[in-house]
Image (cartoon, rainbow, N blue to C red):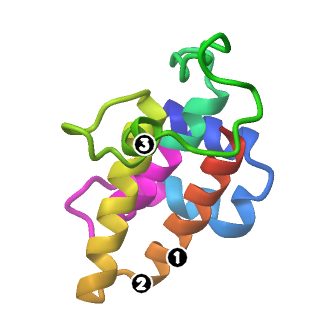
Amino acid sequence: MRLVEIFFQHITHASRLVHRLSFLTALLEGPNSPRYPATSILHAICAIASVHSHEIPGKPMPDLKYQPVFCPFVRVEDLELEQGVSGGLEGSFGIQHAAMAKALMEFDTRIGARVLDAVRTTIILGWYYVSC
């Protein structure tokens, strides 16, 4: 619940995408409620809120001795870590939740469920990737 509050406090456009009062009310109703938010949105909110929370450790800074500051190429290991495909979900709290949100959103999209929530998840994940 704390990360949801951080999301609404620190993400400027959050209220344009998700109505705060309705979202919090639906969240408090519990997972058995038909109004309960999509799990993909919750994971996306956790990912982006982790960037703004001092309680959750972020991604460690790269060692610049081995990787130049402005490297035009992405290392395969970094890409695998970012997508959560190298031996499971590794990496920071934010990366783990972003990978879960993406996987759940893609699943919902494939079966045609909660399409609007899938769009919202994609937008929130976009905000997360820009803010990292």
Q: Nearer the viewer, mark 2 or mark 3?
A: 3
**Residue wearing tag 3:** 76
Is residue 51 in the magenta section? no
Please name the residue that numbered disc 2 is placed on: 115
Residues in magenta, as a range: 25-46
Classed neighbour count for the residue bearing mark 2: other residues with Cα under 10 Å, few (<14), some (14–19), many (≥20): some
Three-letter code for the amino acid on which mark 3 is drawn = Val
| Magenta residue check for 44 | yes
Looking at the picture, how far across and down is residue 28, in whole percent? Answer: 39, 49
Q: Quadrant of residue 60?
A: top right
Query: Label 1 to label 2, Cα distance in Å?
Result: 6 Å
Q: Which residue is under mark 1?
A: 119
> What residue is drawn where x is 65% and y is 10%?
65
Residue at horizontal 70 percent and vertical 36 percent from the top: 71
Q: Are marks 1 and 2 in contact (CB under 8 Å)?
A: yes
Which class describes the residues within 10 Å of circle 1: few (<14), some (14-19), or many (20+)? some
